[in-house]
Image: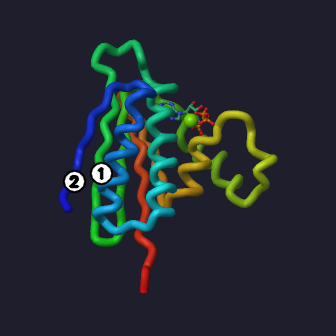
Amino acid sequence: MKDIRLQIPCRADYIDIVRVCLYSIASKLSFTYEEIEDMKVAVSEACNNAVLHGSPELADNSIDIRFQPSDTSLTIKVTNKGPAFPHDEALVKAAPLQEGSIRDLPVGGLGIFLMQALMDEVAVETKDQTTVVTLMKTKKQTE
Ligand SMILES: Nc1ncnc2c1ncn2[C@@H]1O[C@H](COP(=O)(O)OP(=O)(O)OP(=O)(O)O)[C@@H](O)[C@H]1O
Ligand SMILES: [Mg+2]
């Protein structure tokens, strides 16, 4: 399957459209129900962050979602305009929580933790007022 691109207004009430698209693409690729649910939560968190922490004042404010399927995985790139943030710090801060208790989680700051827990790879790139969050999930071997 070739890459698929979706552009939505940078608003919370459009994020369900991303989930519907993800569901149909991941189903076509034969991901399991659990894998699809994991990806839905992760991509929703990335889009929520774009809405909450992006630049709502921009007239052409939108979120670009690029689905990149392969035989064995699905990569989803979520791009938004907005200020850079210390993503290395946020990723490192979230990582040790995977081994800790849910009680140790701070209020807020759950989104990146969830993305890391649910996806096989998470990368954040911020430059020139553009943030790209890359989420990758590999298909479980069924045999
Ligand atoms: N797309 C983005 N643009 C700018 N800053 C971002 C973006 N995504 C994340 N951040 C920054 O990284 C921090 C951590 O993100 P994370 O999703 O883990 O937590 P949160 O959004 O603050 O809270 P929660 O997701 O639990 O409601 C955010 O508080 C924000 O400062
Ligand atoms: Mg968040």
Q: Nearer the viewer, residue 25 or 91?
A: 25
Identify the residue at image location x=23%, y=49%.
Answer: 4
Q: Describe the element under mark 2 as helix, strand or loop.
A: loop
Identify the residue at image location x=28%, y=60%.
Answer: 69
Residue 56: image location, x then y, percent = 42, 17
Residue 46: image location, x then y, percent = 47, 40
Q: Describe the element under mark 1 as helix, strand or loop.
A: strand
Label 2 sits on residue: 3
Q: Quadrant of residue 55?
A: top left
Q: Residues within 10 Å of mark 1 (few under 14, many from 20)?
A: many
Disc 2 residue type?
Asp
Q: Are marks 1 and 2 in contact (CB under 8 Å)?
A: yes
Residue 107: image location, x then y, percent = 73, 34
Q: Residues within 10 Å of mark 2 (few under 14, many from 20)?
A: few
Quarter of the image that includes the N terminus: bottom left
Quarter of the image that includes the C terminus: bottom left
Please report whichever mark, 1 or 2, sits nearer to the chain's N-terminal start.
2
Find the distance from the CA under tag 1 to the CA under tag 2: 6 Å
Q: Is residue 84 above or below residue 41?
A: above
Disc 1 residue type?
Phe
Drawn side of residue 27 relative to residue 142, left or right: left
Q: Is residue 27 above or below residue 127?
A: below
Label 1 sits on residue: 67
